[in-house]
Image (cartoon, helix red, strand yellow):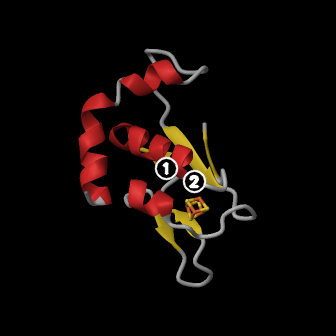
Amino acid sequence: MNAGALCLQVEDVTRLHVARWPHASATREESMKVIIKSEVCVGHGMCVLACPEIFSLSDEDGHALVVDENVPPQLEDAVDQAVRGCPEGAIETA
Ligand code: SF4
């Protein structure tokens, strides 16, 4: 399975996201924000595999970059998967 297909598959379950976030509510209107702690990232690229729409790897140092810190609702679960899959714990969302 490629990462693009993974992101498309999670579109149907984005409503589950609301229940998982302590600060979230059913009426949440702000988008999820994502950052990478550059001092922690070592460039595995697992985040890019989980959601290439949001993460990429720098051509300069090979570390992850956030393409857009504002995560669209349909990609929130894929970003969540990237957070869980980062071996270094370098990704944070709010
Ligand atoms: S998976 Fe984590 S450590 Fe690896 S490139 Fe992505 S953010 Fe960096």
Label 1 residue near ligand 1, CB within 8 Å: yes
Residue visible at 55% across and 46% down in the picture:
83
Residue type indicated by callout 1: Ala
Instruction: Give the x, y percent position of residue 64.
Output: 56, 67
Residue type indicated by callout 2: Cys
Q: Quadrant of the C terminus?
A: top right
Q: Which residue is mark 1?
A: 82
Residue visible at 47% across and 18% down in the picture:
19
Residue visible at 42% across and 39% down in the picture:
76
Q: Circle 2 — which element? A: loop
Q: Are marks 2 and 1 in contact (CB under 8 Å)?
A: yes
What's the distance in space between the residues labelled 2 and 1, CA to CA? 6 Å
Label 2 residue near ligand 1, CB within 8 Å: yes
Instruction: Give the x, y percent position of residue 25.
Output: 50, 16
Tell whether 41 sits left or right of 14: right
Pick the residue in front: 9 or 85.
Answer: 85
Tell whether 40 sits left or right of 85: right
Q: Quadrant of the N terminus?
A: bottom left
